[in-house]
Amino acid sequence: MTQSEPVKPGDDAPPGTPGTGENLCPRCGGSGRVEAKSCPDCNGTGKVVTGIGGG
Ligand SMILES: [Zn+2]
């Protein structure tokens, strides 16, 4: 493998990292709110980041 991308251990996965991605929160549809409350899935950000392996 010849990758020149810097890797910072412990840091968040950078955009474009294989296996990870920022997606629209399916629970609130990206609004960040569910029933007038902050979405528990995305903490009100409206976006969720999926990682390798999942939870
Ligand atoms: Zn959400």
Image (cartoon, helix red, strand yellow):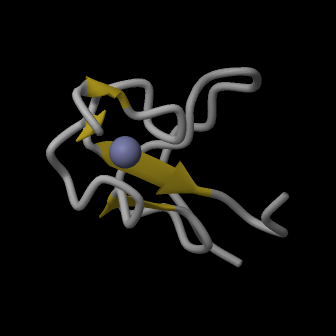
| Residue 31, x across and y down, in percent | 15, 44
Q: Name the image quarter holding residue 11.
A: top right
Residue in the foreground of this view, choosing between 38 and 8: 38
Counting from the top left corner in percent of width and height, residue 36 is at: 22, 28
Name the quadrant of the N terminus.
bottom right
Q: Is residue 26 above or below residue 32?
A: below
Residue 9: % across, % down:
75, 26
The answer to whether 38 appears left or right of 43 in the picture is: left
The count of marks equals 0
Q: Is residue 14 above or below residue 16?
A: above
Name the residue nearer the viewer: 19 or 22: 22
Location of the C terminus by quadrant is: bottom right
Residue 3 in the figure: left or right of residue 1: left
Query: Residue drawn at (49%, 50%), measured in percent from left and top?
Result: 49
Q: Quadrant of residue 29?
A: bottom left
Q: Quadrant of ligand 1?
A: top left
Identify the residue shown where x is 41% and y is 59%. 27
**Residue 42 left/right relative to 46:** right
Residue that protrudes farthest toward the bottom in the picture: 1
Query: Which corner quadrant of the image does residue 51 belong to?
Result: bottom right
- Residue lying at the far front of the rendered structure: 35
